[in-house]
Image: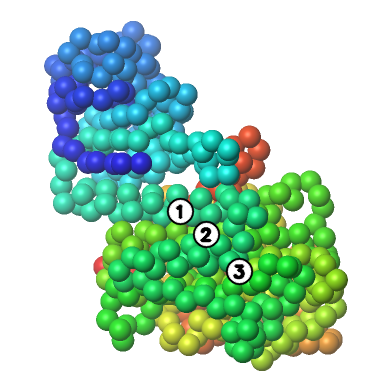
Amino acid sequence: MNFELKTLSLASAAKTSTDTLIVLISEQFEAGKDPLSVLISKATQAKDFSNKTGKTLQAYGLAGVSAAKIILVGIGEGKPSDVKTGLTGAMATLKAAETSKAAVVFAGSVTSAQLHAAVLAVADSTYVYGTTHSKPKLRKLTQVTLGVQSATGALKEAFTSSVAMVEGIEFAKEWANRPANHATPTMLGKAAQGLAKTAGISCEVLGPKEVAKLGMGSFMSVAKGSAEPLRFIVLKYQGGAKTEAPVVLVGKGITFDTGGISLKPAPEMDEMKFDMGGAASVLGVFKSLSLLKPKLNVVGLIPACENMPDGLAVKPGDVVTSMSGQTIEILNTDAEGRLILCDALTYAGRFKPDTVIDIATLTGAVIGALGKVTAGLLSNDDQLAEDLLASGTKSGDRAWRMPLWEEYDELLKSNFADMANIGGPQAGTITAACFLARFAKKYKWAHLDVAGTAWVSGAQKGATGRPVPILMEYIRSKAK
């Protein structure tokens, strides 16, 4: 998708050469004498159109307007969520049409947040996955102009960062959407190495022998049942001084999760290809970093493997030793994400990080608590949690903080090891985070459980690219 930002009034937008012209109209709209203003006024008076969020009206061949097709879109109060809702509906009408060029124009003043919402909504609404089709599907809409009354410095900055974010989101979607046989740990490693061809990014991919030397017994135990060899991916982005402490992102990379010996039920198991959504988001962030080039350092760690149930697979009741030296009784092999993340969190300490954020499709319990709307956030540092919550609100990729109290930590007690890998049937999201917190005591750490937000099911099944927006917004704020 090619985006461009232009200074366009409604009068100049009418003269713009494009296939489809989409006009966003809020409650604050004041009509002028140009053809588009006249159309909006007449349609509103006739009650054929309303500026309420999501209301649309299509017109064709309007005198004085170059575009063959015009779509008026109501965005109500003009909140970013209103812009997203209105544009999503409008873009749906273009998906079936042979539209290659479109212009989206705000009929009034524009904020950075509104522009950000518009860029992300257009990209998300027109995204097409086609990698594994016999005839690769392609996006029909390839050129979009965003028109604002005055392309100020703040709007230009918001536009640039939003476009870079879209690239990262779509890279994350691509890898999360791929079937497991097209997104093995080895393939993820090669994708990361591809990112390292960009200046400022380096990559190291460790295999089973190197991981064994590091003593990552917990990570290795999950991979034992699979014929696919594990990979531990280390990405580095150098945007700040070499001495500057990095932000470390740790992404869960279970490229397929059967549950292991604690086998999952068959219905919808195909969706367990999305269990590497955390890893995909880390790859997506580095894609965005390669374009935006913020002035700070970022490290990405991805422990990648499959969780399979063959004769070598780890069994319920087995005890393994993590890289930290702590022992873990594996009561449920389907609680495997935390087993690979804990060793990656220990490894993260060697970078003397400013902060560490892990991202994982970790628990079904988070869906029961928060649905598919928001990610679960748990942290050992209040300021880090507040910063991430603010970044989520600003980017439109929200999170909600949950408690991380000692009473929950008690549920991880084991008679046979330092801890169990599950804490019982209650508070599953919190006890999973309590488990991870035991490996993150030496630095400021936050955990994002994105099991409810990393993908959608049903007819629109596919990855969302979340939480790339919240992570990129957090990184941008740190860079400033």
x and y percentages locating residue 230 in the rendered image: 64, 72
Which quadrant of the rendered structure holds the N terminus?
top left
Q: Do residues under tags 2 and 1 come within 8 Å of each other at their CB atoms?
A: yes
Using the image as rendered, state which of residue 361 and residue 447 is in the foreground.
361
Specify the amino acid type for callout 3. Answer: Ala
In the figure, is residue 337 to the left or right of 72? right
x and y percentages locating residue 187 in the rendered image: 56, 62
Crowding near the residue tagged with mark 3, few <14, some 14–19, many ≥20 C-alpha atoms within 10 Å: many
Q: On the image, numbered disc 1 is attached to which residue?
A: 171
| 321 is higher (above) or lower (below) than 239 | below
**How far apart in space, not on screen, are marks 2 and 1 (Cα)?**
8 Å
Crowding near the residue tagged with mark 1, few <14, some 14–19, many ≥20 C-alpha atoms within 10 Å: many
x and y percentages locating residue 471 in the rendered image: 43, 62
Q: On the image, numbered disc 3 is attached to which residue?
A: 304
Using the image as rendered, state which of residue 97 and residue 58 is in the foreground.
97
Question: What residue is rendered at 63% in x and 51% in y?
Answer: 179
